[in-house]
Image (spheres, helix red, strand yellow):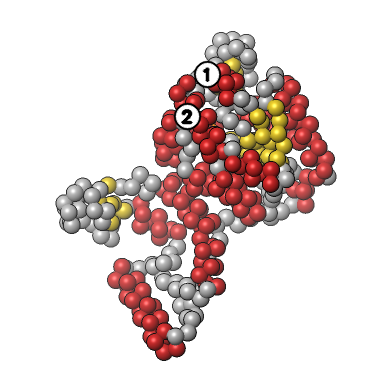
Amino acid sequence: LEIADEKIIERVLNRLICTHCHAPYHLTFKAPRKAGICDICGNPLHKRPDDISEMLRVRQRAFQRVIKPVLEYYQQSRRLLVINADGPMEKVSAEIVAAVQSLQNQERRADAPTEPHRAPVIVSGIQPPARNKEAKTACHLILVGAPGSGKGTQAEALRDTFQLAHIATGDLFRENLKNQTDLGKLAKSYMDRGELVPDDVTEAMVEDRLAKSPPDSGFILDGFPRTLPQANALTEILSHFERHLDAALYIKVPDAVIENRLSGRRVCRKCQTPYHLLFKQPAQDGVCDLCGGELYQRDDDNPRTIRSRLETFHLQTTPIIKYYQDAGVLFEIDGQGDVAAVTRSSLAVIKTIQDSLR
Ligand code: AMP
C-alpha cells in the first residue's frame, strides 16, 4: 500500500484506537458516533503514544530503511502488487479487490507467475551527502564499553585531538528530555529502568544526526551501537552515506570498578563534562570548572539502575564486540588505569589508524 509520507502524517496524527477491540478511528475521516467512544464495543478510544509527529518521522525513517530489500525481494520473485493507498477507503479497497481478481484470473488462465501489478516507487530516505575527496582521511570511530567505562571522557580527548564530531546517544536522549520532546519522554521510561531505548527509535535518531554532520568530517560515536541489530543498522547507515567504520575502541573495565565510578559521578548540566566525587573533583563544589554550570547526579546513576545497566551491557552489548572483532576493526583498551594513561592508549590507537588513512 503505497502512500506519500505527508499523507501518512495527516492520517496518523489524528488517529484514535479503541483501547479494547483496537478498531481504528480518525478525527476527520472516520469519527466515532460519540466522541472518544468506540462505535463497536463502547470502550474509550485512545491515541497511540507513538502517534506523535516527532516519533512518526523516526518511524518513517526506520521504515524506509528496512523496506527497500523487502520490496526488492517480492519484486524479484514476481509477487509484488503495488496499490495506490491515497484516497478514500472505498477506492483503495476496490483497487485491492481488482488487483487480486486479476491475479486469480491470470492464475486460472496460465498457472504462470504473475508480472508485478505496477513497478514500486521506493521512497529513498535520506540522500547521501556528496562525498568530498578530503573525507578519506576523516576518521570514523565508535566507542564500546560498559556504562561508566570512561567512554565520554575518552570521546572528549579524541574529539579535541582529531577534530571529530562527538555523537553520544545518551546525551541526545537527555537533551530531548531536557527540552521535554516526545522522544525524550519516551526514552526516559527506558533510561530510568536502566534498559535500552528500542533499536528503531535509536537508529533513526543516529541516522538523523549523521545526516547533519558534514560529509568530510570524522565522527566518534559514543554509546552507539549497543546491540547487534544496531551494529548492523550502523553498517547500513554508513554505507548509505558512503562512509565506513575505521575502528571500534572497546574500553574494558571490571564491573566492581564501574559500580564505584558511577555512584560518585557528577555531570555538568550545561556542557555535560563528567566529574567524580573522589577521582575528579571540580575546583568549587558542585560547579563545572569549564563553564560554571551546575553539577548534578544523573537519575540513572543510582545503585539499582547501575546494576541493571551493567546487566543490559553484558546481555545486549557484548555480542557486538565479536561482531567488530570479526570485521577486523576492534581495538581493546584497558580502561582501569588513571584517565591520562587510558587516554594515551586511545590516542595512540587512533593516531595509527589516522596515519594509515593518509
Ligand atoms: P549513556 O549516557 O550512554 O550511559 O546512556 C544512558 C541511557 O540512554 C542508557 O541507559 C539507555 O537507556 C539510553 N541509550 C543510550 N544509548 C543507547 C543506545 N545505543 N541504544 C539504546 N538505548 C540507549
Residue 334's spot in the image, x, y percent?
70, 27
Q: Residues within 10 Å of mark 1 (few under 14, many from 20)?
A: some
Q: In which quarter of the image is residue 352?
A: top right
Name the side, left or right, on which 52 lies relative to 34: right
The answer to whether the beta carbon of the residue marked 2 is less than 8 Å from any atom of ligand 1 is no
Camera-side residue of 17 and 107: 107
What residue is at 28 percent from the left and 56 percent from the top?
A: 24
Q: Mark 1 points at which residue?
A: 263
Quadrant of the image containing the C terminus: top right
Name the side, left or right, on which 93 lies relative to 78: left
Tag of residue 44: none
Q: Which of marks 1 and 2 is nearer the N terminus?
A: 1
Q: Do the CB atoms of the residues marked 1 and 2 lie less than 8 Å apart?
A: no
Residue 143's spot in the image, x, y percent?
65, 36
Residue 23's spot in the image, x, y percent?
26, 56
Q: How crowded is mark 2: few (under 14 residues within 10 Å), some or many (20 or more)?
A: some
Camera-side residue of 232 and 257: 257
Tag of residue 308: 2
Residue 212 seen anywhere in this rendered image of the structure: no
Q: Which amino acid does label 1 sit on?
A: Ser
